[in-house]
Amino acid sequence: DSVFPGKFPSVGNMSARNTGSVLDLDWISRVRVNHQAVLKRAQYIQSLKVSKKQWQAAWLLKAVTCIDLTTLAGDDTPSNVHRLCLKAIQPVRLDLLKNMDMHDKGCF
């Protein structure tokens, strides 16, 4: 049986309704925050972060690997198919990869 009789269903009776508990707003008003500790921790975490641009570039490169390069057009020419194949082989221009120091990582 539950440690809290009448409040929670027992494990053996999964169909019983969870009646929940009363919201105690007084408890929330008694919560205290050490603002100095929070600020110090926030500054520390911020110092560890990689720049936003690096994360954006990494996610964009990852997104490129998910692009479907299938053509469904019935009127494709051999040159369109060839261009699509080249894009599949090298989806990101080499100069852009070099600029991001990703040209020798084996991703593309």
Image: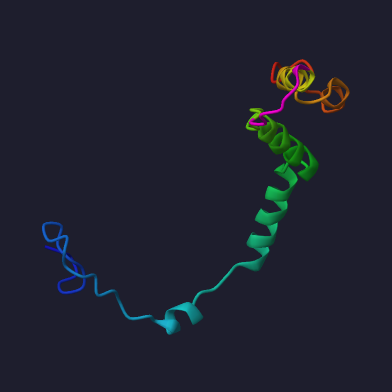
Q: Specify the color scheme.
A: rainbow
Horizontal side of residue 1 vs 65, given as left or right: left
Looking at this view, name the residue that lies furthest to the bottom: 26
Would residue 2 be counted in the magenta stretch?
Answer: no
Q: Residue at x 77, y 23 (%)?
A: 80
**Looking at the figure, which quarter contains the N terminus?**
bottom left
Residue 74 position, x and y percent, is 66, 29
The quadrant in which residue 81 appears is: top right
Near-viewer residue (20 or 4): 20
Instruction: Note whether 52 is above or below 69 in the view shown.
Output: below
Horizontal side of residue 1 vs 97, given as left or right: left
**Looking at the figure, which quarter contains the C terminus?**
top right
Would residue 73 be counted in the magenta stretch?
Answer: yes
Magenta-highlighted residues: 72-78
Q: Residue at x 65, y 54 (%)?
A: 41
Q: Residue at x 33, y 81 (%)?
A: 22
Residue 9 position, x and y percent, is 17, 66
Looking at this view, name the residue that lies furthest to the front: 75
The quadrant in which residue 91 appears is: top right
Count of marks, rendered view = 0
Residue 98 position, x and y percent, is 85, 22
Near-viewer residue (52 or 106): 106
